[in-house]
């Protein structure tokens, strides 16, 4: 094992203390210490290029055990451990002798193993050239950030910032009884929206369970890194995401229904599509839904999906709902980050004048960074971004996580509601109670 340069530096730092102790030791110990401090013409110690840590001490002191005892006596042995105890960033490569820290500071290493990429926001980043991986030491070049022109390990990013949730408004909501007199697969005009939602949710839940079982089998029976294993796990992830999105689409309807059912207890609140077409409960539906009184026909509100069609990608909100209360005032906007039961919260890396910050989904800076990404993508999204920004200023924007709940104790998984958790840092003022 090569001796790490950090060990040599540590030796140099402690030798002065050791020399003082050697004055009261045997002449052999003093000679050994003096030998260690004799530099070659290159300014480096001979043993540094050819001996491991134990061999270096043996070469100088004659016996490794005596050497260790001498250093222990001086309380410096913990500084002289072999390189296997070093942090991975400091561990030298077996071929080049360079640690990862030294590698990312070497312009030649960067030029060979990384390429420059201009991001959507105009920022320049470094991307690993995977066709030149691994490097001469068999190490895959580590992902790096380019901070003020200096490469830094992505693993050294600061912890993600979060303001948490508004616990006073957070709730766990359970499925409610639906109209069981609806034919399976049908939607008779103005009745039965809740059973239609539940059937769609159950369909996605069944696909999620099948995908989870297939993924567990793939992890058990297929080689790590294989195409089959990766595809199966990716299918599970997508199935879970779609299930979370379906529950989130149901949650916005339950929210608005509860508002008007409480405000107008004598009304029979139902949903229909604004264009009069057949009700589509799918989370992928792009149709505007009306909340109305099935007896009088009075329309109380319209719910319009404003998010991008399909599964959301990077720098997007999962779901954006425009809720027009038909009262002549500007609409409310409800942003859902839709989550499966164990889905992790997304994080965003922000590159500012003060360096790199990481913020979690829901943080006000995450919200603003997403709006800026929308403004860069298209004119339509830029207009929506400005509407969301203005709604937030006016107290008309509710930004929350909707996390689906599943009972997995039985043979078949069962839908068990969702957690409704508004993010802290916003000042939403509902015009109707949300209880």
Image (tube, grey):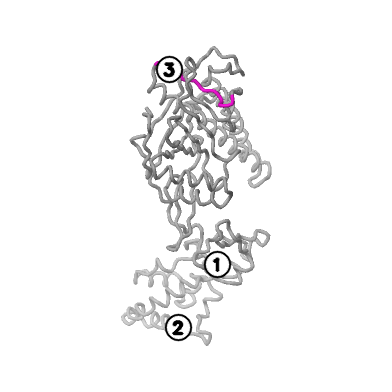
Q: Are marks 2 and 1 in contact (CB under 8 Å)?
A: no
Tell me if residue 156 can be seen: yes
Would you say residue 267 sits in the magenta stretch? Answer: yes
Above or below residue 375? Residue 416 is above
Circle number at residue 104: 1
Can you name the residue that lies furthest to the front here?
328
Q: Identify the residue position indicated by label 2 in the image.
A: 35
Quadrant in which residue 203 is drawn = top right
- Pointer 3 local density, CA inside 10 Å: few below 14, some 14–19, many at least 20: some
Q: Residue at x 38, y 76 (%)?
A: 14
The secondary element bearing badge 2 is classed as helix
Please name whichever residue, 181 or 259, is drawn nearer the observer in this view of the structure.
Answer: 259
Return the disc, 3 or 2, that comes first in the chain's sequence: 2
- Identify which residue, 64 or 79, lies in the foreground: 79
In the image, the segment drawn in magenta is 266-275
- In three-dimensional space, the C-alpha distance between marks 3 and 2, rounded to whole angstroms, equals 96 Å
- Earlier sequence position, callout 2 versus callout 1: 2
Q: As drawn, is 296 to the left or to the right of 184?
A: left
Residue 324 position, x and y percent, is: 47, 32
Within-10-Å neighbours for mark 1: few <14, some 14–19, many 20+: many
152 or 248, nearer to the observer: 248
Q: Find residue 124 and report its image quarter.
A: bottom right
Is any atom of residue 411 visible in this view? no
Point out residue 239 in the picture as x, y percentages from the top left corner: 59, 34
Q: Is residue 372 magenta?
A: no
Q: Is there a contact, CB below 8 Å, between mark 3 and mark 2?
A: no
- Residue depth check, mark 3 versus mark 2: number of the one nearer the observer: 3
- Secondary element at image label 3: loop
Disc 3: which residue: 267
Q: Secondary structure at mark 1?
A: helix
């Amino acid at each position: 094992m090569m001796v790490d340069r950090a060990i040599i530096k540590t030796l140099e730092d402690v030798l002065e203390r050791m020399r003082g102790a050697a004055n009261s030791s045997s002449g052999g110990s003093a000679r050994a210490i003096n030998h260690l401090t004799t530099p070659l013409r290159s300014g480096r110690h001979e043993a540094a290029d050819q001996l491991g840590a134990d061999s270096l001490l043996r070469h100088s002191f004659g016996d490794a055990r005596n050497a260790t005892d001498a250093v222990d006596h001086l309380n410096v042995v913990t500084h002289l451990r072999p390189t296997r105890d070093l942090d991975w960033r400091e561990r030298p490569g077996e071929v080049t002798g360079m640690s990862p820290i030294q590698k990312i500071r070497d312009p030649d290493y960067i030029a060979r193993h990384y390429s420059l990429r201009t991001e959507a926001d105009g920022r320049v980043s470094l991307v690993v050239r995977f066709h030149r991986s691994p490097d001469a030491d068999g190490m895959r070049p580590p992902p790096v950030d380019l901070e003020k022109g200096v490469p830094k390990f992505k693993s050294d990013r600061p912890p993600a910032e979060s303001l948490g949730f508004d616990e006073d408004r957070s709730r766990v909501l359970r499925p409610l009884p639906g109209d069981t007199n609806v034919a399976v697969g049908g939607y008779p005009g103005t009745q039965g929206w809740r059973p239609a939602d539940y059937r769609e949710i159950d369909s996605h839940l069944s696909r999620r369970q099948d995908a989870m079982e297939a993924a567990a089998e793939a992890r058990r029976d297929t080689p790590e890194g294989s195409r089959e294993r990766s595809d199966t796990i990716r299918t599970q992830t997508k199935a879970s995401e779609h299930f979370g999105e379906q529950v989130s689409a149901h949650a916005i309807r339950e929210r608005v229904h509860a508002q008007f059912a409480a405000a107008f207890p004598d009304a029979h609140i139902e949903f229909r599509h604004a264009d009069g077409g057949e009700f589509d409960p799918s989370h992928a539906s792009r149709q505007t839904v009306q909340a109305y009184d099935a007896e009088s026909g009075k329309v109380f509100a319209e719910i319009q999906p404003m998010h991008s069609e399909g599964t959301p990608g990077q720098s997007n909100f999962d779901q954006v709902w425009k809720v027009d209360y038909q009262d002549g005032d500007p609409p409310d906007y409800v942003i859902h980050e839709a989550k499966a039961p164990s889905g992790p919260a997304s994080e965003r890396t922000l590159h500012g004048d003060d360096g790199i910050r990481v913020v979690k989904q829901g943080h006000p800076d995450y919200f603003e960074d997403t709006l800026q990404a929308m403004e860069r993508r298209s004119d339509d999204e830029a207009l929506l971004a400005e509407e969301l920004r203005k709604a937030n200023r006016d107290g008309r924007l509710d930004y929350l996580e909707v996390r689906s709940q599943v009972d997995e104790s039985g043979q078949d998984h069962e839908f068990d509601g969702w957690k409704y958790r508004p993010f802290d840092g916003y000042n939403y003022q509902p015009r109707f109670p949300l209880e």
